Amino acid sequence: MDRDDREAVFAKAGTRVLPIIIIDDKYVGDYEKLLALDETGKLDPLLKMDQQTLISEEEHKARLRRFSGGGTAGGTALPAAPFAAAAPEKKATSADKAKFCPNCGSKAGAGKFCTDCGAKL
């Protein structure tokens, strides 16, 4: 992120304290605020978790291939709506072995949040 982009984020959030958490183009707060939202059950509605799905390992690899094939002259750019053109996905069940973050596609660990992007799993 270049300096102008960082300054725009700081201005929009009204703070320079990191991390700056923005959901749906609205400043939510810092890490402690995020945890408080999760503990009170208010985070899932903000993240629209009822609309999220986990993807298979095959779909994860296909998305990474599609993503790594693109980019800009200044580096790889994230799509405006990550992986929006992907094939329909099934709802995940506890029987699924490999789990991946629906936001960034990273392999999900045992925690509640993605270790790469911070999205709730």
Image (cartoon, helix red, strand yellow):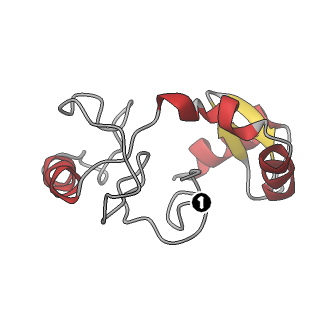
The answer to whether 95 appears left or right of 61 in the picture is right
Q: Residue at x 31, y 65 (%)?
A: 97
The image quadrant that residue 53 belongs to is: top left
In the depicted structure, whether residue 84 falls above or below residue 1: above
* Between 39 and 25, the one nearer to me in the picture: 39
Quarter of image, res 19: bottom right
Q: What residue sits 41% from the left and 46% below the top?
A: 102
Total numbered circles: 1
What residue is rendered at 46% in x and 35% in y? Answer: 52
Q: Secondary structure under badge 1? A: loop
Residue depicted at 73% across the width and 39% down the height: 43
Residue 108 rendering spot, x and y as whole percentages: 44, 65
Residue 91, position as x, y percentages in the image: 35, 38
- Apparent side of residue 72 relative to residue 42 in the rendered image (left or right): left
**Residue marked by disc 1:** 113
Which residue of the protein is positioned furthest toward the bottom in this rendering?
110
Viewer-proximal residue among 69 and 28:
28
Above or below, 28 against 21 in this view is: above
Disc 1 residue type?
Phe
Instruction: Give x and y (percent) for residue 5.
Output: 58, 43
Residue 33, position as x, y percentages in the image: 86, 49
Question: Within 10 angstroms of label 1, few (less than 14), some, or many (20 or more) residues?
Answer: some
Residue 81, located in which quarter of the rendered image?
Answer: top left
Q: Between residues 102 and 15, which one lies in front from this camera angle? A: 102
The answer to whether residue 44 is left or right of residue 61 is right
Nearer to us in this view, 52 or 6: 52
